[in-house]
Amino acid sequence: MGAVGDVNHAAADEGRKRVSGAGPRADGAAAKELPESLLVELRALPSRYPQARGALLPILHRLQEWRGWLAPADMRIAGEIVGLSAAEVFSVVSFYTMYRQRPVGRFPIGVCRNIACWVNGSEELVATVKQELGIGPGETTQDGLFSLEEVECLGSCGTAPCLEIESCYFERFTPEKLRTLIASLRKGSGDPAGAIAAAAKGS
Amino acid sequence: METYLSTEFARSGPLLLDEARAKGRWKVAQKVFESMTPEQVVDEVKNAGLRGRGGAWFPTGIKWSFMPKEPLKGPSYLVINADEGEPGTFKDRQIMEKDPHLLLEGIAIGSFAIRAETAFLYIRGEYKAAHDALALAIAECERAGILGDAAMGTKKKMRIVLHRGAGAYICGEETALLNSLEGRRGEPRPKPPFPAVWGAFGRPTSVNNVETLANVPAIVERGAAWFKARGTAQAPGNLLFGISGAVEKPGCYELPLGTTARELVEKHAGGVKGGGKMRAFIPGGASTGFLPPDKLDVAMDPESLRKEGTMLGTGGIIVIPEEISVVDAARVFSRFFRHETCGQCSPCREGAAWSDQVIARFQRGEGLASDFALLEDIMRGSKQRTICVFPEAFAGPLGSAIKHFRGEFKHA
């Protein structure tokens, strides 16, 4: 069936994850030392669940909050705490879109591309990022400040179009507001979390 | 119109405990914990005819009655599905961000009804604002003794554990959600066993949607007859209808089940944006598919929409304007479902990806006359052949697009 020949590669190619990364063995970028206080915090999480494994997602969230992504060393530590191998942890990490297997910019911008946002101009937001920062989906600026990703429905359909940065929502957004946001984040790049929170409050 | 779910939606931040109590929150749970039996709560909810607002519309009281009556050799759990991810749906978020104590009170009553002392509230990872509002509300309740080892001053225990997901549409499927709660890949489980027998951490579990539980305090307080006075005979109560897309006033509107789509779109949401024309509308979230504008007089309840060959789903209406083709809109969904299939069942994994490729080909203007049969074949070959109903979900927009809007699919 030559007619569908171009479809042949389709099925297996595009997995759930847009960003691929190293498996648990490649260990290069993990030099950052985990603070003891964080380790104590992580070790307390399994007691919230009937089985230690229940704490895996919260532990991974907390580790990613600290490093900005999940290095193989983080997956090993998570595994040690809940009693899983690094490979088992990696199989969980690779399932969920919010876990990052490689570093991204200090301000990872996620533009919703689903129906309500798309009908209300999400493509213009992606184009504005391209104009302002020269990056497309899956790319990071050379200075390491901004990354762009297209994401699926954020549940902001009634306040579309929406973009998010570290799960802070910027709703009813416009190219103009986006330009202002990029400028204010750039000024606050010394304290990314603070800059995002301040911008979210003002938007 | 009387509302009981959305009274706080106009606020900018969450209703805090003191003010929430002044508005009557926790009064019903207090009465339940002090003077009712689990059977009485289940019976009231059963008699009220409350059905699950997550999209499946299964009767809540009946679901609860499947749970063990005596705690056997271990605990039962209530799990709250706050993994709101169906495109076009943003109702649960309003409850959690604005009126978290309404939900927490519903959770406490629901837990009491199924004899659970622990509830796991699984919220999608992206909902940071809602998560923070709930975390604060739970902490308030723990400090005030509403939750804890002597909940509300009684001898009963009640604990609510807030748990964040990490980005996966499929975790809205209840058994995928349970796997995710247990720290596993969010892949749906084969059923049986159903969650009431083998749920979270291998224990009997009832999984209920946020809005469903938010209905419970009012039902217990005012009674089944009061509840049944609104909505339809088979689907009583109000629903939080979301209206989005190309409308003047998108938003979340609390109205009785059975309200027509036309009233929602034209009266409440102010009609099509800019006075434009409608090309299509989606009645209840992405997986319910497209309907042409001449179906706008359909009543928004499960039975009426089934007669139109679709579903009420989550009640999230999405309006597609004249200037956007259904082919392009269908591609947004096929790309979405291709991205979100969990991949464990071949018919779904392959079907979602192949159908996306075929729609993409139509979008490029390279469709073939034989592609309609190919799409039908993909849908036939994947529906009811997998662990969960994901193929039914991606077939919603696909099947309805080629049924109602075939003329838009140009082919050689």
Image (cartoon, coloured by chain):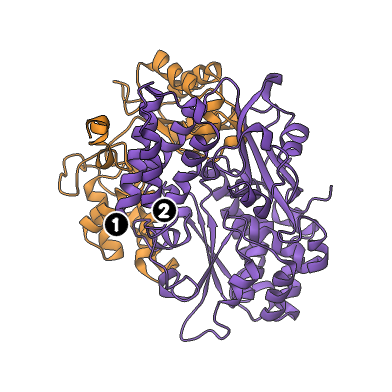
In the image, taking residue B176 as reference, residue B111 lies left or right, namely right
> Which residue lies under the disc numbered 1?
A78
Q: Residue furthest top?
A: A131
* Image colour assigned to chain B: purple
Which x, y percent locates residue B128? Answer: 52, 44
Mark 1, secondary structure of its residue: helix
- Neighbours of disc 1 within 10 Å: few (<14), some (14-19), many (20+): many
Mark 2, secondary structure of its residue: loop
> Which residue lies under the disc numbered 2?
B383
The structure residue drawn at horizontal position 64% and vertical position 50%, both measured from the top left corner, is: B307
Is B27 located above or below residue A178 in the figure?
Answer: below
Distance of mark 1 from mark 2, alpha carbons?
Answer: 38 Å
* Image colour assigned to chain A: orange
Type of amino acid at the residue the image marks with label 2: Lys
**Chain designation of label 2:** B
Snapshot quadrant of residue B103: bottom right
Which x, y percent locates residue B66? Answer: 56, 76
- Comparing A21 with A1, the one in front is A1
- Neighbours of disc 2 within 10 Å: few (<14), some (14-19), many (20+): some
Is residue A148 visible in the rendered image? The answer is no
Name the mark nearer the viewer: 1 or 2.
2
